[in-house]
Amino acid sequence: MATAHEPVAAHHAANAEGISQRTRLYDGRKAAHRLHVLIVGCGMGGLAAAHCLGQAGHKVTLFESAAAIGEVGAGIQVTPNVSRLLRRWGVGDNLEAVAVRPEAIVLRRYETGERVAYTRWSDMEEQYGSPYYHIHRADLHKLLFDLAAPFMTLRLKSTVASVDPEAPSVTLASGEVVHGDLIVGADGVKSMIQRVVLGHTNPAEPTGDAVYRAIIPTEYLLKDPELKPFVDHPEMTGWMGPGRHIMAYNIRAKKEFNIVLAHPDDGSVESWTAEGSADKMRADFADFEPRIRKLLGFVKSTLKWRLMDRQPLKKWIHPSYKVILLGDACHPMLPYRAQGAAMAIEDAAVLGNLLSRLNHPSQLRALLQAYEDLRLPRTAETQRQSRLNQHIFHLPDGPEQEARDAQMRQAMEIELRMMREGVSPADSLEGSPNQWADRKKNEAQFAYDADAEAERWWREVGEKALGEAGEFEERVAAKL
């Protein structure tokens, strides 16, 4: 068995080879003016951008410093705002084969396991038009890689050492200079391209938290009557405790159980691949309920990741309008709202849709500005919601925690009554400390359609402003 920090192979069902070549996006629209786009970073956002920009008709070269493509052993959540895109891109059946649809989110008291909050998720498709999934990171990464592969030239072992934002070009560590028309920085939380765009690095602020991550084969849980229900009835289960919380859910068609444990940081590093001590992890959560102690007894190795927070950026675009940012490079998310990869994939969808309309170089500035205008406010609000959950989950025992639990129980009773009686509640539960019970927040987060937002901007703003400019440029060109 691979240790926790080693790359994990994707599941055999996470195979989308050839699908993107049979799928038409943007009603088959391709950019009349074709760009050579240089993407830096082969994570979820970089691959999604390569796919969407390729579908829009652009040439794509992707640079990755690693010698091989891979993901660490950890789960990830694919919320309806992302699953609708993945379905549109043709990999809906692949998701069904390898992911798990959770029935609900359940939040519990740390020392007793008492259920404090419950929100049904089995109706996500009915409510928001697409399902909620839990999936292994390696499997999602492989699906995105397969979608992008036909549209990109992949350059591995290609560390970008510097960028000329005016050319634009990238200089690799080898000294090679590669020129293009647009550079997309999808190079993660420690983005070098961000420094190019801003002129400085957005400072990171310690949250005071770190997380352990581990995966347990569900065959162990199925042998224990107390743990078997976690597999039989797949839910996202959370345990809230003073300064700590745990989230756990099934992945890989319920063959694996993913567990994430947030705790006070004791000197870890901000890295997806740093290995932690399983014994220290068990000691840190020794006061949690017996089922948690059983689960942690199965863990042989764990990843440990320091959580750093960063404020929203004021801009994502270099003044030259030839270098832009995407994903964690411009809006890294704390994991408390499960929207990090989601926001990066949405970015890619909006960018690809907008640039499918590029008919002349003069239009690029306005289309890139639309990308920032459409995406920056949404990602900044999602960052804010993620920070809020850290506070909510980690309250010390006392009056504030008791008030939180009482509000969550009230929302749970409304939810359970709705399920029993089959009626829609009058109470929207706006402001509930269980943010997944807040219907207004759910609608904003999960009903969002990145392509629809890009199309709306075109109808309301772009068609008149850029359509007329494009026609003018075409008439001028025809006379030359």
Image: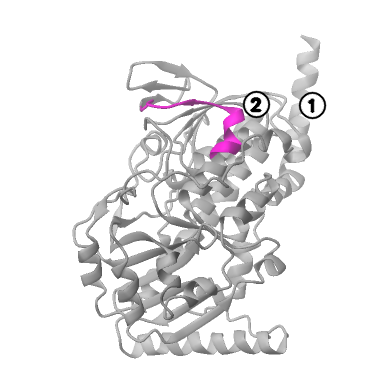
For label 1, the SS is helix
Which quarter shows the C terminus? top right
CB-based contact (under 8 Å), mark 2 and mark 1: no
Q: Where is residue 11 shown, x and y percent of the image? A: 51, 47
The residue positioned 42% from the left and 40% from the top of the image is: 70
Residue 140's place in the image compared with 210, above or below, is above
Residue 153 in magenta stretch: yes
- For the residue labelled by badge 2, is the local secondary structure a helix, a strand or a loop? helix
- Residue 419 occupies quadrant: bottom right
Q: Is residue 226 above or below residue 182?
A: below
The residue that label 1 is drawn on is 471
Q: Is residue 90 above or below residue 248?
A: above
- Residue occupied by mark 2: 362
* Left or right, 109 with reference to 26: left
Q: Is residue 251 left or right of residue 85?
A: left
Within-10-Å neighbours for mark 2: few <14, some 14–19, many 20+: few
Picture quadrant where residue 216 is located? bottom left
- In this picture the colour scheme is one colour
Q: Depth check: give the residue in front, 279 or 346.
A: 279
As drawn, the label of residue 28 is none
* Range drawn in magenta: 145-159
Camera sees residue 370: no
